[in-house]
Amino acid sequence: MERYRGMDRAALDVAYNNRAVVPGWQDYLDRWAKEGKPLYAQQATARDLSYGDGPRQRLDLFLAADDDAPTCLFLHGGYWQWNDKEGQAFVARGLLAHGINAAIGEYTLAPAATMAAICGEAVAQVGFLRRELAARGRDPDRIYLAGISTGAHLMAQALAEPGVRGALLISGIYDLEPIRLSSLNGPIGMDFAEARAFSPLHQVPAETAPVIVAYGSDERPEIRRQSDDYAAVLSSLGRDVTCVPVPGCDHFSVLEQLSAPEGMLCKALASLVARTS
């Protein structure tokens, strides 16, 4: 039986089950969806912009008042199998408060798409967003990437895309090998080669935008370790990277540090924008 860091399949299932250690995880999802509704009613500039032909190849756009504002593309988490953009669009509240446009993206879920296809959709959203912003008379060359969990993994695929100035990656998966060996891989169907090819830890582009690698201090040890390892690899290559543990936060509450204008992660992203713009 294949093992990862001494863990067999059963142990990996436990190590990567973020919901098991947050009893109120569904309450978070319900509250986030509720908090996103006023934003859609009051501040959504465009809904369901299609970056491809698939039913989930779409994004929503919330534009700040300043025509020269930078833009943050955010992708939701859910182990490439769950959730949608509406359920985590509440993060636009914090971004808009700092004068940052918010693009909330979605992607095809497994098993309807392979890991390669899902990663391709993440990259495609960056190019589409640049064209959309230009068509609206907005700045297409100050794109910032953000994502939670698997959304962070997907945004790491686009760090070298044109127009990307920086990224905030929250509680991400940067080595897919433990996922391949766990039951989470059932709907995804990755083999070793695909897991390695789409692991940011093992496939760092020749150039990358500055990155903030963040995670909650109360998260699963494997999530914290993956983040620390990825930040260490970027640092060893001389990249501009900052590792930010967020005190007192778990895999769900950490996202509220981005949605709140005074949240630790929202202010960190705003500082990154100011530094790199």
Image (cartoon, rainbow, N blue to C red):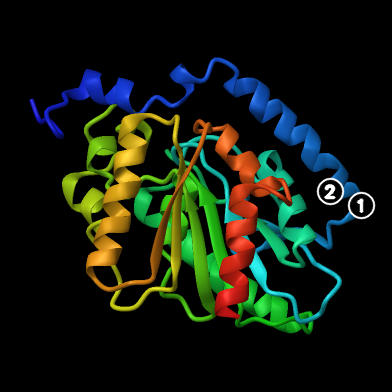
Nearer to the camera, 74 or 126: 74
At mark 2, the secondary structure is helix
The residue that label 2 is drawn on is 39
Residue furthest to the top in view is: 23
Indicate the amino acid at tag 2: Leu
Number of callouts: 2
Residue at x 47% of width, y 66% of height: 123
Residue plotted at (42% across, 38% down): 111
Instruction: List the residue tagged with mark 1.
Output: 42
Q: Is residue 250 left or right of residue 269?
A: left
Instruction: Tell me what residue is drawn at x 66 percent, y 47 percent.
Output: 263
- Where does residue 187 sit, x and y in percent of width and height? 37, 33
Could you say which quadrant of the image residue 61 lies in? bottom right
Please state if 176 lies on the left or on the right of 73 as rendered. left
Q: Position of residue 47 (x, y in %)?
A: 78, 56
Q: Nearer the viewer, residue 33 or 113?
A: 33
Image x and y of residue 241, in percent: 39, 65
Residue at left offset 76%, top offset 81%: 68
**Image quarter of the C terminus:** bottom right
Using the rendered image of the protein, determine whether residue 57 is visible from the camera's viewpoint: no
Please rate how many residues cluster around mark 2, counting C-alpha atoms within 10 Å: few if below 14, some from 14 to 19, many from 20.
Answer: some
Which of the 4 quarters of the picture holds residue 146? bottom right
The quarter of the picture where residue 52 lies is: bottom right
Tell me residue 41's x, y (percent): 90, 48
Assess whether mark 2 and mark 1 are in contact (beta carbons under 8 angstroms): yes
**Do we see residue 141 in this rendering?**
yes
